[in-house]
Image (cartoon, grey):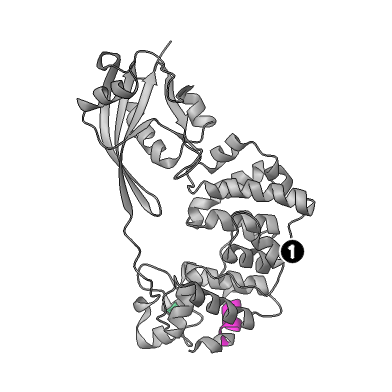
Amino acid sequence: MQINQLNQIVTPLLEWYHANKRKLPWREDISPYRVWISEIMLQQTRVEAVLPYYERFMEHYPSVAALAACDDEELMKLWEGLGYYSRAKNLKKAAQLICTQYHGEFPERFEDILALPGIGAYTAGAISSIAFEQAHAAVDGNVLRVITRLTENSQDITDAGFRRQITEELEKVCPVQGRGDFTQSLMELGAVVCVPNGMPKCKECPLNALCSAFRNGTQLQYPVKKPKAPRKIEEKTVLVLRYRDRIAVRKRKKKGVLSGMWELPNLDGFFTEELLPRQLAETKPEFTADKLHIVRKERFKHIFTHIEWHMEGFLIACDAEYHDDGLIWVTQEQLASGIALPTAFRKVYDKLLPSMTPWQD
Ligand code: SF4
């Protein structure tokens, strides 16, 4: 089919969606706030991973006003493990803006939604169509995959102009009734039938009679994506410093990866067990080899969008609490319940700490 024939997909897609849609909490009791939170959580994150976070978030912050007034540490703790923490920070900023500029009512105009922190064209399209039934499209990777396969279109899906063209074509065919369902049906088809990474389930697809890629057996040739630049690799030495039942943590700088988050102390580059105490003693004179006891070390890897951290994690027993370099010492209980440690550090901590016997006073 051609890109200007997308009007043909509307009816079969909506019928399929009404009969097959997954039961998801943000599809119940639809409101702009609930749709917004779900769409932000779902960025770069699978539905199954989001579900428990979504429920917990809604219990803590059931409204824009509750989110605007939330405690930063609590917000980060609720977000811990979801990654891309700037999403949570922007949610709070946007909620505060909605309270000051719109008296706590989520704005309805597409341009006003788009102007909120952390909201791009996709999320604004999703909120305005799903929550306000407006004729806007939400074009994400799932939707691009479906459309490029239907039309055997080999344009680069990372090209902003191409995404805009698809958005406009979908907005032209958006039905008068069920605009939100139309948006969700395309996302759903891409998520469960026209799947990525392998053969789509074309026999189950309500659009197979219209689909050019299915007819020609070219499904796996679409979508076409310009190859990404390879990720930059950064080597780090990460320290789990323990004194009695306490662990040393500190806040990261306000800029860069995981800005402003808690972290385990770390150094750039890899160090051997012999070199590490010498290096530490250079920067922190009190960290001499006789005061640190290396219990265990292990390699870890953490992947961000553009960077990979290759980490050498050391579990080190200390003979005292050291307070330089912004270190603060927290109990393991605080780390479990009150302090949000990003996954890159959490995986080092979770793996290494059990190697030591628990401290008993
Ligand atoms: Fe995707 Fe297959 Fe449906 Fe075409 S027929 S849209 S390739 S699932």
* Residue 193 image point, x, y percent: 46, 72
Residue 73 location (% of width, % of height): 58, 35
Inspect this view and state whether residue 15 appears: no
The stretch in magenta equals: 8-15
Image quadrant of ligand 1 equals: bottom left
Above or below, 92 relative to 180: above
Could you say where residue 168 lies in the image, as x and y percent from the top left? 59, 79
Camera-nearest residue between 24 and 349: 349
Residue 119 locus on image (x, y percent) = 60, 59
126 w.r.t. 77: above or below: below
- Seen from this angle, which residue lies furthest right? 103
At 40% across and 54% down in the image, what residue appears? 305
Label 1 residue SS: loop
Please name the residue shown 46% across and 43% down the image: 258
Which picture quadrant has residue 292?
A: top left
Label 1: few (<14), some or many (≥20) within 10 Å? some
- In depth, the one of 143 and 303 nearer the eye is 303
Image height of 227 relative to 213, above or below: above
Report the magenta stretch's main SS: helix
Q: Residue furthest top?
A: 361
Closer to the camera in the image, 181 or 278: 278
**Could one spot residue 211 in this view of the protein?**
yes
Q: State the residue position of label 1.
A: 108
- Residue 39 sits above or below residue 323 on the image: below
Is the C-beta of the residue carrying label 1 under 8 Å from the nearest atom of ligand 1?
A: no
The reply to whether the magenta stretch includes residue 16 is no
The amino acid sitting under disc 1 is Glu
